[in-house]
Image (tube, helix red, strand yellow):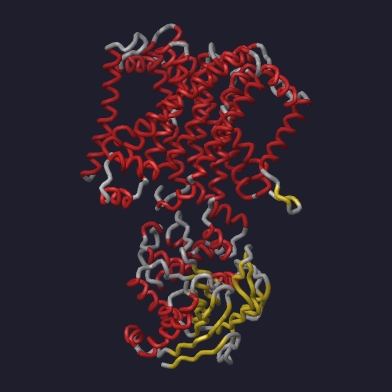
Amino acid sequence: MSRLDYRSAALRVASFGIVLAAWEYAGRMPVSIAFPSLFDTARAAAQMVSDGSLIRALGITIVPMAIGVAISALAGVLLGLATGLSRRTEWLGIPLFLVLQAAPLAALIPMLVLAYGVGLATKVLVVCIMAVPVIVLNSYKAVRHTPVSLLEMGRSFLGSRTQVIFKIILPAASPVIFAGLRLGAAAGFVGAILAELLISPTGIGDLITYHQSIAEYPQMYAAIVSVIVLSALFLELLDWLEFTLFRPEGRAT
Amino acid sequence: MQILGYRIPNAVSLLLWATVWEIVGQARITILLPPLSSTLVRLLEIAPTETFMTALGITAQAYLLGVGISILIGVPLGIVMGRSALIDRLILPWVSLFVSAPLTALVPVIMVLFGFGETTIVLTVVLFAIWIIILDARAGSRGISQSLTEMARSYGATRWQAFTKIYLWAALPEILAGIRLGLVRAVKGVIIGQLLVSVIGFGYLFEIYSSNFLMEHMWALLLVLFFFAYLLDAGMGELERRIDYYSAARH
Amino acid sequence: MTMQATTQNETPTATAAAAVSVRGVSMVYPGPVQALQDVDLEFQAGKLTTLLGPSGCGKTTLLKIIAGLIRPASGTVLVNSRPVDGPGPERAFVFQDFALLPWANVIRNVAFGLELRGVPTAEREAVAEQYIAEIGLVGFERKYPHELSIGMRQRVGLARALAVKADVLLLDEPFSAIDEQTRRKFQEDLLRLVAMERRTFVFVTHSIEEAVYLSDRIALLSPRPGRVWKIIEPRMSRTLSPDQIRREPGYLDTVEAIWQSLKDYVE
């Protein structure tokens, strides 16, 4: 590693170190009775992992997440393609999705959960509702912004419509599409967790509210940190997928 | 889109969907979706009531306060991050983490620390809005071309002058884009915050309506929210368009 | 070296058969902007003809009409005596901004025209390798466009056009993004290619020197509306070395004469 890389890595470590140290200090002070120290939280996390409750809860949360994101990705990219390629579909779809994207769709969640319960299907539905609009809009934007000279080049070499879509438009659009997938996945996570926090005793949301209700704050914080770590890992996975599947030349274009 | 050579504006598309809503609602396909017409009637009914107005006031207040704080802290921080590599390296990992983290999970923390009142809501709004505002302000600040900086120095501008007369404007397109996204996220934040806190503002109303299955009331409320969110977004878009004329020519 | 000039719409008796014929082509853009008006031109087979003129004279528009990428408002284009209706396998286009697929390596980019035709992988890669060698990029087959210099990228675009074995090659200001030093080398390479490949080349540029150096024939276009205004045949002796050619009085006189003619049209 060059000197610059060392410096950069050192600063990263310093950044984490400072925040974690501040957490530990604030916890010991204590800032509030409800603010456990870093060590207490870590200990609680270790305990919850070992007794299986954390993993089980995360599992319950992540299954509808993954399914929902997969469905949303497929539906969202297809819709984005359709609206990007056809003016008619664009006119029909984009105004609607623009409204949906700005809207706080989270407000629909209590309604859905009350009507259909907190089963797997409802959670998948919630994830899809939260994720699809942003995926559609990003995919649409990506398709519309395909460089004109690449399209002309495809035409000049007699590419058929299908060939141009799969060999030129989709690969060219993939960075923005994946940016949309990341945003969609993040929104989906919010939906899944919100459903759990609001209503019913399942998954990680349940773990959080349960420990909150019996004032076991280290456990509560541990659960929260775990879900944040989980979401970060999930997004890393998406990044890796994009890199290996679509852009072998690396992210910089 | 064109039919027979006449351009049909996008707004008509929304009217089309509104009609679909009406038809689906009238057909009573699901209890969850009442017809648009009865929702609108209900909206006119509840809007002038005191309960609604109070809830609206609380929500709007928390929203504006939260957004204000996010902008006042987020924009300068982002700009500083764009210009100082040290600060950037220290703070960026956290901003990147939180901009796509499920912030909903952090709301219980805020609730536990700050109680069930307006403070929590305001902090939730800040939590949701600030990261994207920081990131985009940073992007705008980083994008300021080298030659502008050198020009400022060569003409002897003071730090403050350079900031207010050049850097702020040069980064403004990105800053506005970030604020626009922040405003939308802030709406989600204020709603989610209130849903979880559920004893004040719109969250309280949602709680009442949903537990009593007052679907028309719920949708009336949702319509109001959706409409305001859309207005905000469109308004910011208009603002962005105003300065669009120079944003492409900056490089 | 002699310079032969003929005036608008008079084509000299062709000594070689015309590979491309442009008859009465006009193009109007919304505005209305008359990009081209009643253009008649013949492009001799096996030769390099240049469309030269200041910006706005419609030379790229004309090139794209010949390529079939733009449909003219009126008139016809014949290639090998057959009318043009859209792009075709007998014509290949080289783009000003290269239009390479950023996510594909060199060999895939060069083979792309063949890939679109359904040529099997082994076969098309073999053809691609042949042309990669011809343009001098052996060893770079697995590199990606962002790893190549600007000059190399344009060579990939050229190889791609050559690989589909089209009769007519259309080059849209291919060297305009390249620095002066590399550009000279490319011009020399292109001359060698024209002699070797024996295909018809149609070249668009706004550089007078480039046109005089490269072309068997130059069509001067004037702007607003785009019209063929003069046809010049710089009879360059190809026996001289490239550097000698550039210092030949005849070459310099031709360049100066063209410049004087075009001066009025430059804003």
Can you give x and y, in whole percent of width and height, for residue B43 in the image?
Answer: 68, 21
Dividing the picture into quarters, in which one does residue A94 lie? top right
Would you say A57 lies left or right of A164 here?
left
**Which residue is depicted at the point 55% across and 58% down?**
A151
Q: Nearer the viewer, residue B77 or C215?
A: B77
Q: Is residue B210 above or below residue A187?
A: above
Seen in the picture, residue B250 relative to C98 is either above or below; the reply is above
For image coordinates 67% across by 76% down, the residue present is C75
Q: Examine the rendered structure and indicate whether residue A71 appears above or below residue C112.
A: above
Q: Is residue B226 above or below residue A239?
A: above
The structure residue drawn at horizontal position 50% and vertical position 86%, both measured from the top left corner, is: C232
Residue B162 on image: x %, y % = 31, 43
Residue extending furthest right?
A: B27
Q: Specify whether residue A56 is in view.
A: no
- Badge count: 0
Residue at the farthest left position = A3
Residue at image position (64%, 65%) is C32
